Amino acid sequence: MGKEKLLKLLHDFKCTMASKATFVILTVAMKKGMWRAMKVIPKAEYEIYRIEKAKTDKYGKLNFDNRKYSSGPQYAQRELMVKADAFTVLILDEQYNTVQIHDRLYGEQKESMKWGPF
């Protein structure tokens, strides 16, 4: 991004006051000469998540991030996919169909059990 574009961007932010925090960050970056290293913010929305394979135990539960999440007894001893973002954990089958949705566990919570499929 060129210096002129950054100046215009700063001016636009100042005029619209769309985001005070972003304006401050851009101003500090410009003063420190870091404007060359800055990337353009994507215009399209995007998801941030992690996908991993996990094998279920004989009860249909799987381990992800040292926590246990239930899938269902019909998925016992199978390899499933886990799609996790900051707030949710989706259990997916081989065709990427959603099997179960859990709130992501943090802190002292060690297991999430959905009794519906059992």
Image (spheres, grey):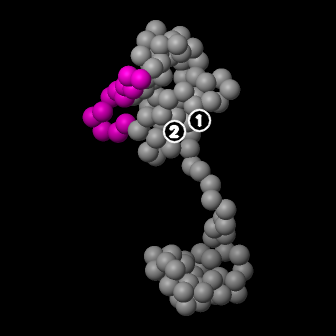
Query: Which of 5 and 109 lies nearest the eye of the viewer?
Result: 109
Residues at discs 1 and 2 in contact (Cβ within 8 Å): yes
Query: Which of 23 and 72 lies nearest the eye of the viewer?
Result: 72
Label 2 SS: strand
Magenta stretch: give its range.
105-116
Where does label 2 land, which residue? 84
Label 1 SS: strand
Q: Quadrant of residue 97?
A: top right
Q: State the predominant SS element of the stretch in magenta.
A: loop
Q: Quadrant of residue 2?
A: bottom right
- Give whichever of discs 1 and 2 has the lower sequence position: 1
Query: Where is residue 49 shown, x and y percent of the image?
Result: 56, 44
Q: Is residue 114 magenta?
A: yes
**In the rendered image of this protein, does residue 86 appear above or below residue 43?**
above
Where does label 1 land, which residue? 51
Instruction: Judge from the rendering whether residue 21 lies leftward or rightward of residue 41; answer left or right.
Output: left
Query: Which of 113 and 39 lies nearest the eye of the viewer?
Result: 113
Which residue is pictured at 58% across the width and 22% down the height? 80
**In the rendered image of this protein, does residue 79 appear above or below residue 44?**
above
Which residue is pictured at 65% across the width and 23% down the height? 94
Question: Distance from label 1 to label 2 (Cα)?
Answer: 6 Å
Instruction: Indicate which disc residue 38 carries.
Output: none
Query: Where is residue 19 shown, x and y percent of the image?
Result: 49, 78
